[in-house]
Amino acid sequence: MLIDSHVNLHAAAFALDLPEVMVRAKAAGVARMIAICDRWENAPAVAAIAEAFPGVGMSVGAHPHYAKDHQALRAEDLVAFAQNHPKVCAIGETGLDLHYGYSPLEDQKTLLWEHIKAARILDMPLVIHTREADSETRALLRQGMQEGGFPMLLHCYTSGVGLMQEALRWGAYVSLSGIVTFKNAHEVREVGAQIPLDRLILETDCPYLAPIPHRGRRCEPAFVADVYAFVAQWRGVSLDALAEQVAANVFRLFPMLRTPA
Ligand SMILES: [Zn+2]
Protein backbone atom coordinates (compact mmCIF):
# COMPACT_ATOMS: atom_id res chain seq x y z
CA MET A 1 0.00 0.00 0.00
CA LEU A 2 1.28 3.44 -0.99
CA ILE A 3 0.14 6.62 0.73
CA ASP A 4 0.34 10.15 -0.66
CA SER A 5 0.13 12.38 2.40
CA HIS A 6 -0.28 15.70 0.58
CA VAL A 7 -2.50 16.21 -2.47
CA ASN A 8 -4.19 19.40 -3.66
CA LEU A 9 -7.07 17.70 -5.43
CA HIS A 10 -9.35 20.74 -5.53
CA ALA A 11 -6.79 22.58 -7.66
CA ALA A 12 -7.98 23.86 -11.03
CA ALA A 13 -5.42 21.52 -12.61
CA PHE A 14 -7.68 18.56 -11.71
CA ALA A 15 -11.03 20.17 -12.52
CA LEU A 16 -11.48 18.33 -15.81
CA ASP A 17 -10.33 14.79 -15.04
CA LEU A 18 -10.24 14.09 -11.30
CA PRO A 19 -12.07 10.70 -11.61
CA GLU A 20 -9.44 9.47 -14.10
CA VAL A 21 -6.64 10.79 -11.88
CA MET A 22 -8.08 8.80 -8.97
CA VAL A 23 -8.36 5.63 -11.10
CA ARG A 24 -4.68 5.95 -12.06
CA ALA A 25 -3.74 6.49 -8.39
CA LYS A 26 -5.56 3.31 -7.39
CA ALA A 27 -3.88 1.38 -10.21
CA ALA A 28 -0.49 2.61 -8.95
CA GLY A 29 -1.28 1.22 -5.49
CA VAL A 30 -2.09 4.53 -3.78
CA ALA A 31 -4.67 3.51 -1.18
CA ARG A 32 -4.73 6.62 1.05
CA MET A 33 -4.32 10.35 0.46
CA ILE A 34 -4.78 13.51 2.45
CA ALA A 35 -6.53 16.23 0.46
CA ILE A 36 -5.10 19.52 1.66
CA CYS A 37 -7.07 22.69 2.27
CA ASP A 38 -5.30 25.91 1.26
CA ARG A 39 -7.98 28.55 1.89
CA TRP A 40 -10.86 28.57 4.38
CA GLU A 41 -13.42 29.14 1.62
CA ASN A 42 -12.14 26.04 -0.21
CA ALA A 43 -12.76 23.73 2.77
CA PRO A 44 -16.23 22.66 1.53
CA ALA A 45 -14.80 21.77 -1.90
CA VAL A 46 -12.00 19.75 -0.31
CA ALA A 47 -14.57 18.01 1.92
CA ALA A 48 -16.72 17.15 -1.10
CA ILE A 49 -13.72 15.45 -2.75
CA ALA A 50 -12.72 13.60 0.43
CA GLU A 51 -16.29 12.40 0.89
CA ALA A 52 -16.55 11.24 -2.74
CA PHE A 53 -13.47 8.99 -2.70
CA PRO A 54 -12.75 6.15 -0.23
CA GLY A 55 -9.32 6.32 1.35
CA VAL A 56 -9.11 10.11 1.08
CA GLY A 57 -8.87 12.13 4.29
CA MET A 58 -8.58 15.88 4.44
CA SER A 59 -7.03 18.79 6.29
CA VAL A 60 -8.74 22.03 7.20
CA GLY A 61 -6.81 25.27 7.37
CA ALA A 62 -5.24 28.10 5.40
CA HIS A 63 -1.82 28.25 3.74
CA PRO A 64 0.64 30.92 4.93
CA HIS A 65 0.63 32.44 1.42
CA TYR A 66 -2.96 33.54 2.12
CA ALA A 67 -2.45 34.59 5.74
CA LYS A 68 -3.28 38.21 5.00
CA ASP A 69 -6.77 37.12 3.87
CA HIS A 70 -7.32 34.96 6.98
CA GLN A 71 -6.68 37.27 9.92
CA ALA A 72 -10.25 36.71 11.16
CA LEU A 73 -9.92 32.89 11.10
CA ARG A 74 -9.92 31.47 14.64
CA ALA A 75 -9.01 28.11 16.11
CA GLU A 76 -12.68 27.71 17.03
CA ASP A 77 -13.64 27.88 13.32
CA LEU A 78 -11.18 25.11 12.44
CA VAL A 79 -12.33 22.99 15.39
CA ALA A 80 -16.01 23.39 14.47
CA PHE A 81 -15.34 22.43 10.85
CA ALA A 82 -13.34 19.38 11.89
CA GLN A 83 -16.06 18.28 14.29
CA ASN A 84 -18.70 18.54 11.57
CA HIS A 85 -16.70 16.78 8.86
CA PRO A 86 -15.68 13.22 9.74
CA LYS A 87 -13.00 13.05 7.02
CA VAL A 88 -10.90 15.78 8.62
CA CYS A 89 -7.75 14.09 9.93
CA ALA A 90 -5.32 17.05 9.99
CA ILE A 91 -5.07 20.80 10.60
CA GLY A 92 -3.36 22.93 7.94
CA GLU A 93 -1.56 23.32 5.86
CA THR A 94 -0.14 26.11 7.90
CA GLY A 95 3.28 27.53 8.66
CA LEU A 96 5.65 30.28 7.61
CA ASP A 97 6.98 31.04 4.14
CA LEU A 98 9.53 33.83 3.77
CA HIS A 99 10.62 32.67 0.32
CA TYR A 100 7.62 34.10 -1.49
CA GLY A 101 6.51 36.48 1.24
CA TYR A 102 2.99 36.69 -0.18
CA SER A 103 1.72 37.67 3.28
CA PRO A 104 3.45 39.71 6.00
CA LEU A 105 5.31 37.58 8.55
CA GLU A 106 3.16 38.88 11.43
CA ASP A 107 0.00 37.77 9.62
CA GLN A 108 1.54 34.34 8.99
CA LYS A 109 2.47 34.01 12.67
CA THR A 110 -1.03 34.97 13.82
CA LEU A 111 -2.58 32.40 11.51
CA LEU A 112 -0.11 29.65 12.46
CA TRP A 113 -0.89 30.24 16.13
CA GLU A 114 -4.63 29.71 15.55
CA HIS A 115 -3.80 26.41 13.79
CA ILE A 116 -1.59 25.34 16.70
CA LYS A 117 -4.45 25.97 19.13
CA ALA A 118 -6.86 23.97 16.96
CA ALA A 119 -4.43 21.04 16.66
CA ARG A 120 -4.05 20.99 20.43
CA ILE A 121 -7.80 21.16 21.11
CA LEU A 122 -8.51 18.34 18.62
CA ASP A 123 -5.29 16.39 19.29
CA MET A 124 -4.95 16.30 15.51
CA PRO A 125 -1.70 16.60 13.56
CA LEU A 126 -0.63 19.98 12.28
CA VAL A 127 0.58 19.89 8.65
CA ILE A 128 3.40 22.42 8.59
CA HIS A 129 4.79 24.27 5.59
CA THR A 130 8.06 26.05 6.33
CA ARG A 131 10.27 27.68 3.75
CA GLU A 132 13.26 29.91 4.45
CA ALA A 133 11.79 30.59 7.88
CA ASP A 134 13.63 28.04 10.07
CA SER A 135 14.28 30.24 13.11
CA GLU A 136 10.81 31.83 13.06
CA THR A 137 9.05 28.47 12.62
CA ARG A 138 11.21 26.90 15.30
CA ALA A 139 10.44 29.68 17.81
CA LEU A 140 6.69 29.53 17.28
CA LEU A 141 6.47 25.73 17.35
CA ARG A 142 8.63 25.68 20.46
CA GLN A 143 6.31 28.15 22.17
CA GLY A 144 3.37 26.03 21.05
CA MET A 145 4.94 22.86 22.45
CA GLN A 146 5.74 24.57 25.75
CA GLU A 147 2.10 25.52 26.20
CA GLY A 148 0.88 21.99 25.47
CA GLY A 149 1.98 19.49 22.88
CA PHE A 150 0.37 18.51 19.59
CA PRO A 151 1.26 16.04 16.82
CA MET A 152 2.90 17.45 13.71
CA LEU A 153 4.14 16.73 10.22
CA LEU A 154 6.80 18.88 8.58
CA HIS A 155 5.61 18.54 4.99
CA CYS A 156 7.66 18.72 1.78
CA TYR A 157 10.70 19.34 3.92
CA THR A 158 13.42 21.46 2.30
CA SER A 159 14.65 23.37 5.36
CA GLY A 160 17.58 22.97 7.71
CA VAL A 161 18.69 20.14 9.94
CA GLY A 162 18.42 22.17 13.18
CA LEU A 163 14.68 22.80 12.94
CA MET A 164 14.13 19.19 11.90
CA GLN A 165 16.15 17.68 14.74
CA GLU A 166 14.32 19.75 17.34
CA ALA A 167 10.95 18.86 15.81
CA LEU A 168 11.90 15.16 15.83
CA ARG A 169 12.49 15.50 19.58
CA TRP A 170 8.95 16.84 19.87
CA GLY A 171 7.72 13.69 18.11
CA ALA A 172 7.31 15.22 14.66
CA TYR A 173 7.14 13.27 11.43
CA VAL A 174 8.80 14.60 8.27
CA SER A 175 7.60 14.17 4.70
CA LEU A 176 9.56 14.35 1.50
CA SER A 177 8.07 15.17 -1.89
CA GLY A 178 9.25 14.62 -5.45
CA ILE A 179 11.88 17.30 -4.84
CA VAL A 180 14.03 14.54 -3.31
CA THR A 181 14.34 13.01 -6.80
CA PHE A 182 15.59 16.22 -8.44
CA LYS A 183 19.21 16.11 -9.59
CA ASN A 184 20.15 19.39 -7.89
CA ALA A 185 18.39 18.66 -4.57
CA HIS A 186 21.61 17.75 -2.76
CA GLU A 187 20.76 19.65 0.42
CA VAL A 188 17.28 18.14 0.64
CA ARG A 189 18.84 14.66 0.44
CA GLU A 190 21.59 15.55 2.90
CA VAL A 191 19.00 16.60 5.50
CA GLY A 192 16.51 13.93 4.46
CA ALA A 193 19.07 11.18 5.03
CA GLN A 194 18.79 12.01 8.75
CA ILE A 195 15.05 11.36 8.99
CA PRO A 196 14.65 8.14 10.99
CA LEU A 197 12.74 5.60 8.88
CA ASP A 198 10.07 5.38 11.57
CA ARG A 199 9.33 9.12 11.17
CA LEU A 200 9.47 9.31 7.39
CA ILE A 201 6.37 10.04 5.28
CA LEU A 202 6.14 10.59 1.51
CA GLU A 203 3.96 12.82 -0.63
CA THR A 204 3.60 14.38 -4.06
CA ASP A 205 2.18 17.86 -3.21
CA CYS A 206 0.44 17.43 -6.58
CA PRO A 207 -0.32 19.13 -8.96
CA TYR A 208 3.09 20.67 -8.14
CA LEU A 209 6.59 19.15 -7.99
CA ALA A 210 6.27 16.15 -10.32
CA PRO A 211 9.11 13.74 -9.50
CA ILE A 212 11.61 12.48 -12.03
CA PRO A 213 10.80 11.05 -14.63
CA HIS A 214 7.68 13.23 -14.87
CA ARG A 215 9.35 16.55 -14.14
CA GLY A 216 7.71 19.52 -15.85
CA ARG A 217 4.36 17.76 -16.21
CA ARG A 218 1.29 18.15 -14.01
CA CYS A 219 1.93 15.99 -10.97
CA GLU A 220 -0.73 13.52 -9.78
CA PRO A 221 -1.01 11.08 -6.87
CA ALA A 222 0.02 8.04 -8.99
CA PHE A 223 3.48 9.63 -9.29
CA VAL A 224 4.08 9.08 -5.57
CA ALA A 225 5.16 5.60 -6.69
CA ASP A 226 8.22 7.24 -8.28
CA VAL A 227 9.01 9.02 -5.00
CA TYR A 228 8.80 5.69 -3.12
CA ALA A 229 11.01 3.95 -5.71
CA PHE A 230 13.65 6.68 -5.49
CA VAL A 231 13.63 6.82 -1.68
CA ALA A 232 13.83 3.02 -1.36
CA GLN A 233 16.99 2.94 -3.47
CA TRP A 234 18.49 6.06 -1.86
CA ARG A 235 17.86 4.89 1.71
CA GLY A 236 18.85 1.31 0.90
CA VAL A 237 15.61 -0.46 1.80
CA SER A 238 13.31 -2.62 -0.29
CA LEU A 239 10.28 -0.96 -1.81
CA ASP A 240 7.98 -3.30 0.15
CA ALA A 241 9.69 -2.54 3.44
CA LEU A 242 9.55 1.20 2.77
CA ALA A 243 5.86 1.11 1.83
CA GLU A 244 5.07 -0.89 4.95
CA GLN A 245 7.09 1.47 7.16
CA VAL A 246 5.57 4.66 5.71
CA ALA A 247 2.05 3.25 6.04
CA ALA A 248 2.74 2.37 9.67
CA ASN A 249 4.04 5.91 10.26
CA VAL A 250 1.02 7.51 8.60
CA PHE A 251 -1.41 5.37 10.59
CA ARG A 252 0.39 6.23 13.85
CA LEU A 253 0.22 9.97 13.09
CA PHE A 254 -3.22 9.98 11.41
CA PRO A 255 -5.10 7.10 13.09
CA MET A 256 -8.31 8.07 11.29
CA LEU A 257 -6.75 6.96 7.98
CA ARG A 258 -6.52 3.32 9.12
CA THR A 259 -10.01 2.65 7.85
CA PRO A 260 -10.51 3.57 4.18
CA ALA A 261 -13.98 5.11 4.62
ZN1 LIG B 1 3.24 23.37 1.42
Image (spheres, rainbow, N blue to C red):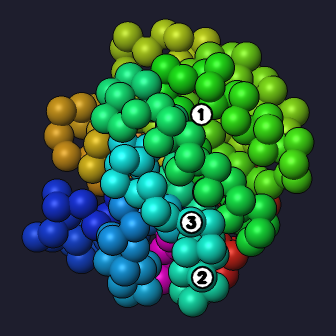
| Disc 2: which residue | 80
Label 1, secondary structure: give it.
Answer: helix
Q: Residue at x 33, y 70 (%)?
A: 42
Marks 1 and 2, the one that precedes in the sequence: 2
Q: Is residue 42 left or right of residue 226?
A: left
Amino acid carrying mark 1 in the image: Ala
Residue positioned 24% across, 36% down in the render: 214
Q: How far is the residue under mark 3 from the one under mark 2?
A: 10 Å
Residue 19 quadrant = bottom left
Task: Locate residue 141, reporting x and y percent.
Answer: 73, 38
Name above or below for residue 242 compared with residue 98: below
Query: What residue would you read off at disc 3?
Result: 74
Q: Quadrant of the N terminus?
A: bottom right
Task: Give the percent coordinates (x, y) of residue 106.
Answer: 50, 36
Judged from this view, the residue extending furthest toward the left is: 16
Of 200 and 94, which appears nearest the observer? 94
Q: Is residue 185 among what the camera can see?
A: yes
167 lies above or below 259: above
The image quarter containing residue 211 is: top left
Residue type (three-letter) at the residue carrying disc 2: Ala
Tell me the quarter of the picture where residue 176 sits: top right
Could you tell which of marks 1 and 3 lies nearer the N-terminus?
A: 3
* 6 with respect to 46 (left or right): right
In percent of width and height, residue 4 lies at 49, 55
CB-based contact (under 8 Å), mark 1 and mark 2? no
- Can I make out residue 261 in this image? no
Rate crowding at label 3 as few (under 14), some (14 to 19) or many (20 or more) other CA atoms within 10 Å. some
Describe the element under mark 2 as helix, strand or loop: helix
Ligand 1 under 8 Å from disc 3 Cβ: no
Q: Which residues are magenta?
A: 54-59
Name the residue carrying label 1.
232
| Amino acid found under the numbered disc labelled 3 | Arg
